[in-house]
Structure formats: structure tokens, C-alpha cells
Amino acid sequence: MAAIWIKRKKAELVTGIAPVFALDAKKKKSGNRARNRVVMAIACFVGIYGIIGGRLVYYGMQEDTTGYNGPTGAVLASRPDILDRNGEVLATDIKTASLYAEPRKIVDPDEAVELLSTVLPDLNFEQTYSRLKSGTGFAWLKRGLTPQQKSQIMALGIPGIGFRTEKSRFYPGGPTASHILGLVNIDNQGIAGMEKYIDEQGLSDLRDVGLADSRSLEPVKLSIDLRVQHVVRDVVVNAMQKYRAIAAGAVVINVHTGEVLAMASAPDFDPNNPFNALDKDHLNRMSAGTYEMGSTIKSFTTAMALDSGKVNLQSTFDARRPITIGRQTIRDFHGKNRILTMPEVFIYSSNIGSAKEADVVGIEGHRAFLHRMGLLDRMQTELPEVARPMEPKVWKKVHSITIAFGHGMATTPLQTAVGAAALMNGGKLIEPTFLPRTIEAANKVAKQVVSEKTSEDMRYLYRLNAEKGSGGSGNRASVPGYRVGGKTGTAEKVINGRYSSDVRFNAFVAAFPIDKPEYVVLTIIDEPKAEIGKVGATAGFNAAPMVADIIRRSASFLGVQPDFREEQESAPLMVNFDQ
């Protein structure tokens, strides 16, 4: 029995231990699986957040090429640099900080506005308070902060206030070429001048598809020479002050390519701070203003008569008596009261002689010629600010007579300069450009508007008019060594519906070196007064000296070498009927 009992106990002991060992093994296997799951979960979380962190670091190191455009968050694109013909920077993008708020996170709008005004005293209190109280998710507060302002605002520690890096346009020359370069708006989009032209040539499309990136935009080179541009603007601004005028302007054009080397109009503006850019007195008078150009138009009247083949430099015109037509009487400003040769009509600026030159061609021929010269049609060029000339709807005899000496039609000074270039370069009318252009490219778009013989005769008349001792009205434009020729224009302005003899718009158009012209220079001055201590406020006393200053100071930059040798010109005989 004892043996049986012992065996039974051993069997119970064995069968009891086996289940215990089986249970322990099962628990151990389950614990390993749990640990594996925890490890795998941790690894996944670490991997995911590692990827997120890596992307954040990557994006933080990239150039910020976007910006908010108000709450919509539109892309703020880069713009290409604008360079002058020699590679000098005229306009470029710089990074600036702009201040924004998240109104929902603003705890105390009153305190926030009060703190911000300590750094930004010009901040509009009511407008800013209204934005902070709006409860929206985003609101601009101030664009284009200085680094110092940003630092001071950050030190205020206002919750719900942040900064956004944006692109802002910077013009190193300030107002030097403002009317040519134009403007951009707060979102860096061109709204005037060549900036607007660049947008219209495809930059706007690139912006719309998000491809306007500074790294992919090639600089835009202009025909402008910054050195000459500086001289021209300086002369214009000084002349406006010297002659106490309401405005002044000037342009320099290459007669063979139509390239504008420089153009200025005063008053102007600083595109870096264009608070007054849209004032009516600050328009670009050279291309966006139309004027009766006075006796400069006699250049075209004389060229028209010569090109008709009906007269030549030896022809004469009776200027002994005024011309009366209807209620108008046409007189000469300084009449000679005698028969004048064609060169005398030009250098003495005879209104009577010019009217009779126009009569040679006739009314329809006169109108057609001025259209052919581009003086009565809207000029085609890159600059958006171009005015349309004005002419009578129906030309009558009186219109042809008055237009012959520069009254009764209005065109832009730039068009007048372009037309004069055609009279100097062999008779080719070339539309002006603010971009580089070769002579070969210019010849492809040029239109022959007068004969080479007419151009040769006009160069002779221009030179004669500017020679010392010739009695011509342009001798104050002479610059020793540079052989300048040109024509004055003194136009009476219409005041209260009538021409005023005391209020004038003066101009002078010149070419140099006149024996083989390379450049045309045209200056204007609006309502000048006589220089203090001197008498006379006609174009010969103000517009002509402006031309001389520009040529004297910029000819070397333009590559024109002075020649001081005496030139012996064989002039056609001028018949003198004085007794």
C-alpha cells in the first residue's frame, strides 16, 4: 500500500509541476511580444517626428520667396534687377520685415497699440485698433520696417504680433531716373515706367504660376547711361530753380539707334519714398505731356519745304508785311521787314517766312508730312506713360499757318526730339527705345521720311543758327570743340483762352557734332522768368544754355571727342536786302 501511495504522490507532483511550468512559459512569450510592440511604436514616433523636424530645418534654411498679401496670403514675387547700359544697378530687390497681427490672439488691443506707437509714432491709432479688435486670423499693421524698428518691436514682447520677411524694391539713385524706372506697389508689382513694362512682358505671368524667383530672373539692361542721366537731371533741376520755372525737362537720344541715353523731368519724385509720385505736377513731361513746341517746329516746316523740291536754300520769302487771316495777324517777334532767304527765315525764326514755307506744300501736304514725321500720332515705345498729340480735327488755312511756327498743335517733347533726330541722321525716323539697340536692328525698323539731301541742308541750318556772330537764336548753346547746332522754340501759353506774351513754354533742340551728328539733345522749361539781374526769358536765354551744360558735362561719357580746330564751312550765299 505504501508503495502505491508513494507512486501516486509522485504522479501528482509531476502532473502539478508541469502546468506551472507551462503557464510561466506562456507569460514570458506574451511579455516579449508586448515589449516588441512598444519598441516598434517608439521607433515609428521617433521616425515620423524626425522627418517632420528635418523638413522644418530644411525649409528654414531656404530663401523666403513668398509673402502675405493681406489675409489671402498671395505670393509676393521677386523682380529682376534693372541695370543701365554699363551694368550699373538702377533698381534691385532687398529683404524687409513687415509687421502683422493675429487679432484672435491679442489680449489687450489698447495696450498693444500704445506699445507699438512708441516705436512707430506715425501708426494710425484708430485703424490699427480696429484691426486688432476685428477678431480675424491675420491683419497687416505696417509694411517695410527698418531692422531697428523690428528689433524694438520684438523687445516689446506683445503676444499675437509677428513679422514677415518680404521683398521691397530699392533704387540706389533715388530720383535720378525716377520717371524712366517708374514704380512698384506695396506688393512689388510694377505700376509705372519700365517697372510696369517688365511686368507686361511676362513677369506677371511668372508670378501667377509661382515661378518669379530671384534665382531664375535675368537682369533687365536699359539703354540709359547713368552718368549722363545724372548730368541731365542735375541740369534740369538747377535750371528750374535758376529761372524760377514751374517745370523743366531734357532728353538725350542716339540719332542712329533711337536709344534714349538719358531723360529727366522736374519736378520728379523719389521712388524709394513715392508719396508725391501721383501729384499732377510730377508727371513725366517729356513723354506724358503735350505742348505747343513753338519755333522748334519750324525745323519740320523748313525740312518739309526743302523736301518738296519746290524750294532750296537759295529761295527767298517776302517777310515785309504781317499776314492777316480772319481775325488773326501773324507777325515776327523781331521782324526784319524785308525779303528773307531760307537760311535767314530759319536763323531769325520768322513766323511770316515759315507760314509761306508751309504754303508751298499746301494744307493736306503739311498735315501728311507731320504725320509722317511721327509728330501727330501716339508714339510707340516701351514707356507706358505716352500722351497722344493733339491737332485740329479739320485743318484750314489758318491752322496750317499757325502750326508752321509751332502753335495750334501739341505734341510731346520726346517726339519732337525723335523727329529732329530723323532730320539729322540722313532722314530715317526711328522710334525711341529705352532698351539697348544696335544700328543694324534700328535700320530694320527705320522709315525714310526725308531725303538725305534735305537732312544735309538741315544740318547746315542747325549749325548756322548756333554759330557765334550769325545772329541766330541758338548761339548760347555753343560748346567749344563740340560743334553744336540747333533751333530755339519760344511758345506763348494759352491763359484764360488767349495767348499770353508773358507766360511761355521754351524749348531748344540741338544735335552734335553737327557735321556728323551722333546725338540729339532737347531741353524744355515751362514758364521761366528772366534770370535774376538779367533781361530776357525766351528760349535762347534759358533752354539753349541748358543744352550747352548737358553737352559740356556729358560729351566725354558719350564718347564724343572735342575738336578745337577752326572749321571753314562753305555756306550758301545768303542774299541781304538791307540797304
Image (tube, rainbow, N blue to C red):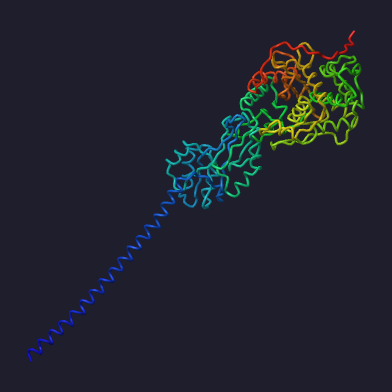
Residue at the (73%, 24%) spot, across then down = 527
Q: With 320 as the anchor, is 192 left or right in this view?
A: left
Residue found at the very far bottom of the displayed protein: 1
Q: With 13 as the anchor, is 39 left or right in this view?
A: right
Q: With 447 as the anchor, is 122 left or right in this view?
A: left
Quadrant housing residue 339: top right
Q: Position of residue 24 (x, y in %)?
A: 22, 74
Q: Position of residue 353 (x, y in %)?
A: 87, 20
Residue found at the very far top of the displayed protein: 579
Q: Nearer the viewer, residue 363 or 284?
A: 363
Quadrant housing residue 199: top right
For the C terminus, the image quarter is top right
Query: Would residue 521 be visible to someone looking at this image?
Result: no
Query: Would residue 436 be visible to someone looking at this image?
Result: yes
Q: Position of residue 486 (x, y in %)?
A: 76, 20
For the N terminus, the image quarter is bottom left
In this view, 109 is above or below 490: below
Quadrant housing residue 445: top right
Q: Nearer the viewer, residue 379 or 278?
A: 379
Q: With 341 as the anchor, is 265 left or right in this view?
A: left
Q: Position of residue 425 (x, y in %)?
A: 76, 26
Residue at the (80%, 19%) spot, across then down = 461
Residue found at the very far front of the displayed protein: 440
